[in-house]
Amino acid sequence: MTAQTQSGSTRSPAPAIAQSAGRWLALACIAIAQLMVALDATIVNIALPSAQHALHISDPQRQWVVTAYTLAFGGLVILGGRVADLIGRRRAFLIGLAGFAVASAAGGAAPTFGALVAARAFQGACAALLTPTALSLLAVTFTEARERAKAFAVFGAIAGTGGALGLLLGGALTQYLDWRWCLFVNVPIAVFALLGGRRVLPAAPGAHSGGQRVDVPGAVLISTGLVLVVYGLSSAASKGWAAPVTLSTLVAGLAVIGTFVLTESRRAAPLLPLRIVADRNRGGSYLAIGLAVVAMYGLFLLLTYDFQVVLRYSPVRAGLAFLPLSAAVLASSTLISRALLPRLAPRWLMAPGLTVAAIGMATLTSLHAGGGYAAHILPAEILLGLGMGAVFVPAFSTATLGVQPREAGVASAVAGTAQQIGASVGTALLNTIAAAATASYLIAHVRAPLPTALVHGYADAAGWAAAILLGAAVTVGLLVTARAPEAHS
């Protein structure tokens, strides 16, 4: 009789338990989808030589297999975040997954270079919808400080390890199966996440019910501007910073983005409410994400060449050589950041994390052609990974903290833009620095072996990356003033 009359004690625990379990099942689906997108940023890189041979792709053309993805992703991610806010995050998430699966299957089966590039561009467009949707789903689903720390620890671990794991998986699939499986592998992952997402993700309505529409002029401006900037950075990696195409596209892209900012400040319902970016805590978090990714993807580039060109590693061995970096990011995200984020102000994780990562990069400045993996590269990977895990978790959490649910998608999209621009800058900038240093070394040391000159270039670029990370640590430490999440409770 007592159990029946005390309805609050008999009926409320079961829904609460179910709701809690549903949140964590939703996190699993979101994590699987985001891992797929993170893997795809690098998984094709190691497979590219095999694809080039199979499809008779010329050297000037091959960059488009990568650039088509980055252009679509970087150019459309803010639009994707806004679309998710308008049509509903669950619907946008499922559409993005289905599209990514179709694009991956088409890319894996591509009979020609043109078909492969088109499939990669479609992949990028779907990733531009999927990535901000995944992050915004976390932001609105996990609001309690400790649960939020756990959820963003998973997301931060994926952000930090996905690129390195993509290199490992790409090497294994290319060496033991076929380069096409670097694309086909996404299909079962996407289908699994799609089926799970349909069951466990909340079916929240979008903002379209309130009469809001997509800011079409703003969407055209920001997409065009970001495409031009990403293309300019990609051109810098292959043609140099002084090339006319590089300078013209970068200047044009920045001019278009400036026009976008000006017009958005005057719109009643803008695509990107400028207060989201102007907030010092969110702005500092976006900066931390972007500059951390500059170093992370710069390291992928430098070490991939060092492993395969200088040390003569096979694709699989080169991928395995990145595992300590992934393990360090995972440990830092799930153990250190998860435990400290609820109790520490975000800057006390981000600034020290960037500093530790800078020390790891600085370790690579002593790299030389005769040096072994264990002496220089392994310590650098561990330090960089530990630092990145302490950066990504609080940065992603703070970037979406305090945003109204109807704007969570676009706030998350800016974080995705910071990632994409950071990856493009890191690849272009550090590749250019390394190439220039290698050329200068060969001029000064005419009889020097090529591997010695190459490693000299890698070490020089690592020094610049360390300086960028140190500058980011100081800037983020001064800019981000948010209190510890539990202090808001």
Image (cartoon, helix red, strand yellow):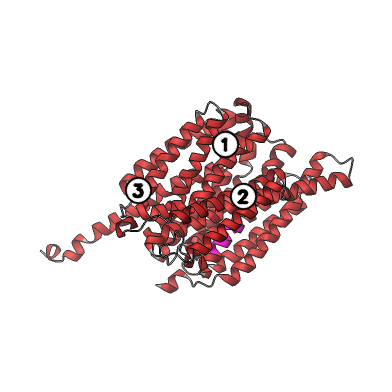
Q: Is residue 293 visible?
A: no
Disc 2 on helix, strand or loop?
Answer: helix
Q: Earlier in the sequence, mark 3 or mark 1?
A: 3
The local crowd at label 3, few if under 14, some if 14 to 19, many if 20 or more residues have their Cα within 10 Å, is many
Residue 319 - label: none
Viewer-proximal residue among 148 and 122:
122
Name the residue beneath numbered marker 3. 91
Left or right: 141, with 37 as reference point: left
Question: Mark 3 or 2 closer to N-term?
Answer: 3
Q: What's the distance in space between the residues labelled 3 and 2, CA to CA?
A: 29 Å
User: x, y percentage for residue 445?
Assistant: 89, 45
| Rendered residue at 42%/64% (across/down) | 146
Q: Quadrant of residue 112?
A: top right
Q: Which residues are magenta?
A: 285-292
**Residue highlighted by disc 1:** 170
Q: Nearer the viewer, residue 24 or 87?
A: 87
Does the magenta segment cover residue 289?
yes
Disc 2 crowd, CA 10 A, few/some/many (<14, 14-19, 20+): many
Residue 424 is tagged as 2
Name the secondary structure under disc 1.
Answer: helix
Q: Label 1 amino acid?
A: Gly
User: Does residue 441 appear to the left or right of 64 in the view shown?
Assistant: right
Direction left: furthest residue: 1
In space, the residues marked 1 and 2 are separated at their CA atoms by: 20 Å
Instruction: Tell me where residue 171 sits by quadrant.
Output: top right
Side of 70 where 361 appears, left or right = right
Mark 1 neighbour density, 10 Å: few (under 14) some (14–19) many (20 or more): many
* Kind of residue at disc 2: Ser
Foreground disc of the pair 1, 2: 2
Mark 3 secondary-structure assignment:
helix
